[in-house]
Image (tube, helix red, strand yellow):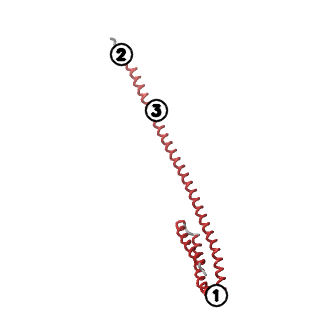
């Protein structure tokens, strides 16, 4: 068997070790680049998700603002319609009160005594009703229903007083 000089074996062995080291270094550099790319993709996805959440939140807020504005318009219309109806009712009631006052001027006996007794009460109730109705136009949303209900009761009492007058 022939001996191979050691120098001849070392050179190819050195070459193999150098190539292995270079391949390992290239794989590590590739892995680092892949890791950087993966991290950048994750950050981009996270930023995209955050942007989508912000957009969805802004859209939800805009829809809520539109809903609130529509509700406020509905409340204002309801108030306006109610107030208009009550002022119209009041005009009709005032005609009846004027008729009662005219009747008072020409009435005699018990009818006159009854009208003299009831008309000041009707006038006082009417004035209180008008004050409360004017105050209702400034009622807040949280008190509107209760204030309106109280005013409706007042109206019923005033109307009954006028209708039951002699």
> What residue is shown at x 35% (from left), y 15% (from top)?
4
The quarter of the picture where the N terminus appears is: top left
Crowd tier of the residue under label 2, counting other residues whose Cα lies within 10 Å: few below 14, some 14–19, many 20 or above = few
Query: Tag 1 or tag 3, which sits nearer the N-term?
Result: 3
Q: To which residue does mark 1 refer?
A: 108
Rounded to the nearest angstrom, the CA distance separating label 2 from label 3 is 38 Å
For marks 1 and 2, the one nearer the N-term is 2
Name the residue carrying label 2: 5
- Seen at 65% across and 86% down, the residue is 107
User: Residue 91, image x and y in percent?
Assistant: 65, 74
> Is 110 left or right of 15, judged from the image as shown?
right
Quadrant in which residue 13 is drawn: top left
| Residue 53 image position (x, y, % from top left) | 51, 48
Q: Which comes before the other along the chain, label 2 or label 3?
A: 2
Tag 1 and tag 2, C-beta contact below 8 Å: no
Distance between the Cα atoms at labels 3 and 1?
116 Å
Disc 3 is placed on an element classified as helix
Instruction: Determine which of the numbered discs, if any, sits on residue 87 in the image.
Output: none
């Amino acid at each position: 068997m022939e001996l191979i000089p050691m120098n001849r074996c070392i050179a190819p062995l050195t070459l193999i070790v150098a190539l292995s080291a270079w391949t390992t270094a290239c794989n590590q550099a590739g892995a680092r680049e892949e890791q950087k790319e993966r991290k950048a993709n994750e950050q981009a996805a996270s930023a995209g998700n955050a942007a989508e959440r912000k957009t969805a939140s802004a859209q939800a807020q805009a829809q809520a603002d539109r809903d609130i504005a529509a509700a406020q318009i509905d409340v204002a219309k309801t108030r306006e319609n109610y107030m208009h109806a009550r002022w119209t009712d009041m005009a009709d009631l005032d005609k009846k009160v004027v008729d009662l006052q005219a009747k008072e001027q020409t009435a005699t006996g018990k009818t006159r005594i009854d009208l003299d007794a009831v008309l000041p009460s009707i006038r006082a109730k009417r004035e209180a009703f008008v004050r409360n109705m004017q105050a209702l136009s400034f009622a807040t949303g949280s008190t509107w229903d209760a204030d309106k209900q109280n005013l409706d009761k007042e109206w019923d009492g005033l109307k009954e007083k006028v209708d039951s007058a002699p």
